Image (cartoon, coloured by chain):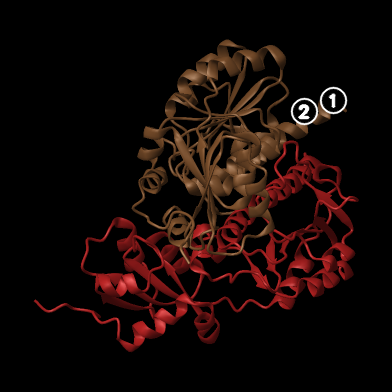
Chain colours: A brown, B red
Amino acid sequence: MAHEGITSIQNPQIKRLHQLLDRKGREAQGRFLVEGAHLVEEALKSAEVLTILYDNERDMDAACRRALENHPQGVQVIAASSAVLAKLSETKSPQGIVAEVKKSQADWSEWMKEKTAAQKDMLLLLLDEIQDPGNLGTILRTAEAAGVDGVVLGKGSVDLYNGKVMRSTMGSLFRLPVFTRSLSEVADEWKALGGHLLVSTLHEKSVSYDQVGYEQKTAIVIGNEGRGVSATMIERADHLVHIPIYGQAESLNAAVAAGVFVYEAQRKRKDRLS
Amino acid sequence: MAHEGITSIQNPQIKRLHQLLDRKGREAQGRFLVEGAHLVEEALKSAEVLTILYDNERDMDAACRRALENHPQGVQVIAASSAVLAKLSETKSPQGIVAEVKKSQADWSEWMKEKTAAQKDMLLLLLDEIQDPGNLGTILRTAEAAGVDGVVLGKGSVDLYNGKVMRSTMGSLFRLPVFTRSLSEVADEWKALGGHLLVSTLHEKSVSYDQVGYEQKTAIVIGNEGRGVSATMIERADHLVHIPIYGQAESLNAAVAAGVFVYEAQRKRKDRLS
């Protein structure tokens, strides 16, 4: 019986999609791949999905079937062989379903203008050269869970659309406004709008994270896993803050630190209301 | 020039050490491997190191040299080829130095007896089938940073001595008392000693993590990444607690959740003292 669908990894469309596994290809095409039924479903809910490829050589589970049945018109659905799906997968056990998604076109200046008009106590997270894709994904998942309004990635960060980032976000990327910008420009803009800038650092002048207020318009800066935050962000800080280290550990994981900060911010905000 | 050191991956000692990359081998031999100068240094400070192997085909950095110079008598130091070091490495870029370390022999009952006599407000973390090695390592690193007194791994967890766990701990494992025990037995023992048991769950009866006290002797239970905590721990809980989710994310990463809990505990304890 002939295979109905794409079986060759030399197929031009597969070759083009394969380029999306690299940052360069994603930047050239303005698109990225997500793998697995859960992420494909989340992308269908909140992003512009262009193509879905599924493995028609294996049994489809319920989540896969749901993703394939509920796509809007205009999404191209392609059956392909297991070998083709494996070619487009970065994981040891390919999930049998992959979607090609358009990068978000959200405009930072417009978003800031609208948000600032609508909300007095915005909470932002600014990420200064986070390098580990698992950390970045977990930070985005945490930020969304904690109700952070938006996240800004500084230049020099790991690519937001890296597959491992995607998988660690658990879909949060599709629901959370995330921008890639120069952090020093964002900090200047933020302060001009009356926003507070808290910079996480073990600097000698930094105070404990629970000794500052988070009730106003606040942005929290989290630094690189090894080097911490850059001097240019420290200069711009309204407060330098740190999470105390009681043991001999040198530091906290960046995603854990982000979690402790944003939940302290929400706890203080909630206490004010009650 | 002849190579001075082990060059064959068929060498019996190398074959024996290679078995330590698997849980089965680690359990049979009661030993494990750590890779990289930083972890080797930490192991030398706080654990029983039996053997150090280093790559004598490449330049040694300062940290490697320090680890090799500061080992106590009785540690066997072996020069070997890059191929041998690669054979004992689980990472893409072998670090050029590996140590064989004896598993800790700390006795739970003795530790508990001594600790309980010395300290009224112990803080424990109980981990109920944490599966992801990166999560487990990050939880241990966080626990040590936050000054948690000890951690208990329930049966069915990922192996504590897994290489990825090691690397994610950043050395905390060597400084933090960690035990592998039946969690329900530990919970019963803890409660018999007057300890409080807080169980993290999104159960309908659970209260927000910041609405309970942590000032007394407290153990916090963190559940499996997918299934959460087991019914047997929920039954034993003094309080069911959760971290509120403000966005649409389904849950927090287990290590982030552990961080938010233990830092809230320390914040409340510090407030009491001040």
**Mark 1 chain:** A
Query: Residue B102: x, y in percent?
Result: 50, 78
Q: Are marks 2 and 1 in contact (CB under 8 Å)?
A: yes
* Residue occupying image coordinates x 57% and y 34%: A74
Rendered view: A219 above or below B145? above
Most distant residue in the bottom direction: B12
Q: Quadrant of the C terminus of chain A?
A: top right
Mark 2 is surrounded, within 10 Å at the Cα level, by few (under 14), some (14 to 19) or many (20 or more) other residues, namely some
Give the residue at mark 2: A269
* Circle on res. A37: none
| Residue type for callout 1 | Leu
- The quadrant in which residue A17 appears is top left
Rendered view: B156 above or below A95? below
Rendered view: B56 above or below B274? below
* Residue occupying image coordinates x 62% and y 39%: A44
- The quadrant in which residue B49 appears is bottom left
Secondary structure at numbered mark 1? helix
Q: CA distance from mark 2 to mark 1?
A: 7 Å
Query: Residue A34: x, y in percent?
Result: 53, 46
Secondary structure at numbered mark 2? helix
**Mark 2 chain:** A
Give the residue at mark 1: A273
In terms of depth relative to the viewer, which is nearer, B207 or A138?
A138
Residue A143 located left or right of residue A6: right
Regarding residue B6, the answer to whether it shows in the image is: yes
Mark 1 is surrounded, within 10 Å at the Cα level, by few (under 14), some (14 to 19) or many (20 or more) other residues, namely few
Query: Residue B217: x, y in percent?
Result: 82, 58
Rendered view: A96 above or below B212? below
